[in-house]
Image (cartoon, helix red, strand yellow):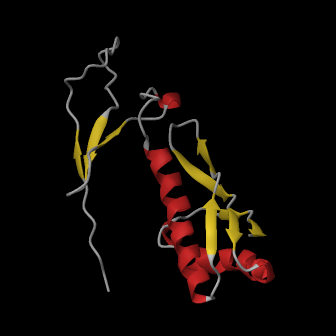
Amino acid sequence: MKHLFKAKLNWDSISKEVISDSKKYSKTHQIAIYGKEILNVSAAKAFKGDPALYNPEDLLLSSVVCCHMMSYLYVCSQNDITVVSYQDHAEGTLEVLENGSGRFVEIRLNPKVIIKEKEKIAQALSLHTKANELCFIANSCNFPILHFPGCEGE
């Protein structure tokens, strides 16, 4: 089974940003997904973008952390574990080379979960591995996604 996802990008050289060097372009643009609010995007501040806007690195990290949570909730439901709350403070490390290329070298997920069934804490912790195996986004990445989970009973 295949699913097609579409995004429309819109950028033009007329910008409210003042670029003092005519060889530099504004990084601000818009992404439109049909039926959803327009997302204003820029480069990260380190790459001369607007720090008030989301950037591709933010969005990649967000995709990984969101997909892992949804996969985790799925495997918990399959194992009769009731998740009361789920929080994560994820971090991603981007490495930039001298030639200007770069890539993420790892993402670290730090999910903290509260479940109803105190007796299933060990199982709930172990299910992060299964969630990672099922995660669409994690399966699309070519860098390690590390997990440092915590779990408590309600």
Residue found 47% across the figure and 73% down from its top = 136
| Residue 95 against residue 98 in the figure, above or below | below
Question: Is 108 placed left or right of 17 in the picture?
Answer: right
| Residue 11 against residue 18 in the figure, above or below | below
Residue found 63% across the figure and 69% down from its top = 84
Among the 4 quarters of the image, the one containing residue 105: bottom right
Position of the C terminus, as image quadrant, is bottom right
Question: Is 73 placed left or right of 81 in the picture?
Answer: left
Residue found 43% across the figure and 40% down from its top = 54
Looking at this view, is 150 or 97 the one in front?
150
Question: Is 9 placed left or right of 147 in the picture?
Answer: left
Looking at this view, is 91 or 140 the one in front?
91
Among the 4 quarters of the image, the one containing residue 4: bottom left
| Residue 3 against residue 1 in the figure, above or below | above
Residue lying furthest top: 20
Position of the N terminus, as image quadrant, is bottom left
Residue found 44% across the figure and 30% down from its top = 52
Q: Which percent across, then down, holds residue 86? A: 62, 63
Q: Which percent across, then down, holds residue 11? A: 23, 36
Q: Which percent across, then down, holds residue 2? A: 30, 81
Among the 4 quarters of the image, the one containing residue 132: bottom right
Q: How many marks are shown on the rendered structure?
A: 0
